[in-house]
Image (cartoon, rainbow, N blue to C red):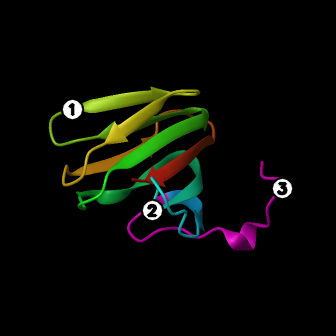
Amino acid sequence: MRTAMNDSEFTTPPAHIHFKAKKFPELGGTFRDGALAFLEPGGGGPLGKHSHPHDHLFLVVSGEARVEYENETVVIPAGTTCRVTGNRPHAVWNNTNQQTVMLGLTI
Protein backbone atom coordinates (compact mmCIF):
# COMPACT_ATOMS: atom_id res chain seq x y z
CA MET A 1 0.00 0.00 0.00
CA ARG A 2 1.47 3.35 -1.05
CA THR A 3 0.53 6.31 1.09
CA ALA A 4 3.06 9.10 0.61
CA MET A 5 3.13 9.32 -3.19
CA ASN A 6 0.57 9.55 -5.93
CA ASP A 7 0.28 6.43 -8.14
CA SER A 8 0.48 8.64 -11.23
CA GLU A 9 4.11 9.41 -10.33
CA PHE A 10 5.06 5.74 -10.92
CA THR A 11 5.58 4.00 -14.26
CA THR A 12 6.35 0.47 -15.42
CA PRO A 13 9.75 0.23 -17.13
CA PRO A 14 9.85 -1.41 -20.58
CA ALA A 15 9.72 -5.25 -20.54
CA HIS A 16 8.83 -5.35 -16.81
CA ILE A 17 5.60 -6.73 -15.29
CA HIS A 18 3.77 -5.94 -12.03
CA PHE A 19 6.54 -3.40 -11.37
CA LYS A 20 6.02 0.31 -10.67
CA ALA A 21 8.92 2.71 -10.16
CA LYS A 22 9.47 6.41 -9.61
CA LYS A 23 12.77 7.59 -11.06
CA PHE A 24 14.83 10.09 -9.10
CA PRO A 25 16.51 12.94 -10.98
CA GLU A 26 20.26 12.90 -11.44
CA LEU A 27 21.77 12.63 -7.98
CA GLY A 28 25.33 13.66 -8.79
CA GLY A 29 28.39 12.46 -6.94
CA THR A 30 28.65 8.70 -6.50
CA PHE A 31 25.14 7.92 -7.74
CA ARG A 32 23.98 8.75 -11.28
CA ASP A 33 20.28 8.28 -10.52
CA GLY A 34 17.93 5.94 -8.75
CA ALA A 35 14.36 4.75 -8.39
CA LEU A 36 11.96 3.61 -5.71
CA ALA A 37 10.19 0.47 -6.94
CA PHE A 38 7.12 -1.49 -5.84
CA LEU A 39 7.16 -5.08 -7.15
CA GLU A 40 3.89 -6.96 -6.90
CA PRO A 41 3.92 -10.78 -6.56
CA GLY A 42 5.33 -12.19 -9.80
CA GLY A 43 6.65 -8.75 -10.71
CA GLY A 44 10.05 -7.75 -11.98
CA GLY A 45 12.06 -7.70 -15.12
CA PRO A 46 13.04 -7.21 -17.68
CA LEU A 47 11.50 -10.33 -19.20
CA GLY A 48 14.82 -11.02 -20.92
CA LYS A 49 18.00 -10.29 -19.00
CA HIS A 50 19.71 -7.02 -19.89
CA SER A 51 23.08 -5.40 -19.24
CA HIS A 52 24.54 -1.90 -19.32
CA PRO A 53 27.92 -0.33 -18.54
CA HIS A 54 26.99 0.99 -15.07
CA ASP A 55 26.53 -0.84 -11.77
CA HIS A 56 23.25 -1.10 -9.83
CA LEU A 57 22.95 -1.14 -6.06
CA PHE A 58 19.64 -2.65 -4.94
CA LEU A 59 18.39 -2.17 -1.36
CA VAL A 60 15.29 -4.14 -0.38
CA VAL A 61 13.22 -2.09 2.06
CA SER A 62 10.49 -4.71 2.61
CA GLY A 63 9.73 -8.12 1.20
CA GLU A 64 12.41 -10.04 -0.68
CA ALA A 65 13.84 -9.76 -4.19
CA ARG A 66 16.04 -11.98 -6.30
CA VAL A 67 18.55 -11.07 -8.98
CA GLU A 68 18.79 -13.61 -11.78
CA TYR A 69 22.04 -13.86 -13.69
CA GLU A 70 22.89 -16.27 -16.51
CA ASN A 71 23.94 -19.13 -14.18
CA GLU A 72 23.24 -17.80 -10.69
CA THR A 73 20.40 -16.41 -8.57
CA VAL A 74 21.00 -14.11 -5.58
CA VAL A 75 18.24 -13.58 -2.99
CA ILE A 76 18.06 -10.14 -1.35
CA PRO A 77 16.14 -10.18 1.96
CA ALA A 78 14.66 -6.99 3.45
CA GLY A 79 17.31 -4.71 4.93
CA THR A 80 20.12 -5.99 2.71
CA THR A 81 21.74 -4.91 -0.54
CA CYS A 82 23.06 -6.45 -3.73
CA ARG A 83 25.47 -4.79 -6.14
CA VAL A 84 25.13 -5.82 -9.79
CA THR A 85 28.29 -5.02 -11.72
CA GLY A 86 28.05 -3.34 -15.09
CA ASN A 87 27.89 -5.41 -18.28
CA ARG A 88 26.59 -8.49 -16.40
CA PRO A 89 23.24 -9.70 -17.82
CA HIS A 90 20.59 -9.69 -15.10
CA ALA A 91 16.93 -9.28 -14.17
CA VAL A 92 15.36 -8.53 -10.78
CA TRP A 93 12.15 -10.14 -9.46
CA ASN A 94 9.92 -10.15 -6.40
CA ASN A 95 10.74 -13.36 -4.54
CA THR A 96 7.58 -13.43 -2.34
CA ASN A 97 3.81 -13.61 -2.59
CA GLN A 98 3.53 -10.07 -1.15
CA GLN A 99 4.60 -6.66 -2.43
CA THR A 100 8.36 -5.99 -2.29
CA VAL A 101 9.67 -2.43 -1.97
CA MET A 102 13.13 -1.78 -3.34
CA LEU A 103 15.46 1.17 -3.87
CA GLY A 104 17.69 0.91 -6.94
CA LEU A 105 20.67 3.21 -7.37
CA THR A 106 22.76 3.60 -10.53
CA ILE A 107 26.44 3.85 -9.71
Please tell me which residue is depicted at 58% across the width and 61% down the height of the picture.
21
Quote the CA–CA distance across marks 1 and 2: 27 Å
Which callout, 1 or 2, points at the residue further toward the start of the chain? 2
Give SS at disc 2: loop
Image coordinates for residue 71, horizontal then vertical, percent: 15, 35
For discs 3 and 2, the disc positioned in front in the rendered view: 2
Quote the CA–CA distance across marks 1 and 3: 35 Å
Image coordinates for residue 66, horizontal then vertical, percent: 40, 36
Find disc 3 in the rendering and name its residue.
4
Please tell me which residue is depicted at 33% across the width and 50% down the height of the picture.
91
Find disc 2 in the rendering and name its residue.
32
Extreme left residue here?
71
Find disc 1 in the rendering and name its residue.
72
Give SS at disc 1: loop
Amino acid beneath label 2: Arg
Residue 7 inside the magenta-drawn segment: yes
Image coordinates for residue 22, horizontal then vertical, percent: 62, 64
Please tell me which residue is depicted at 21% across the width and 51% down the height of the picture.
89
Towards the viewer: 27 or 11: 27
The part of the chain drawn in magenta is: 1-17
Quote the CA–CA distance across marks 3 and 2: 24 Å
Amino acid beneath label 1: Glu
Decide: marks 3, 2 in contact (CB < 8 A)? no
Decide: marks 1, 2 in contact (CB < 8 A)? no
Which callout, 1 or 3, points at the residue further toward the start of the chain? 3
For discs 1 and 2, the disc positioned in front in the rendered view: 2
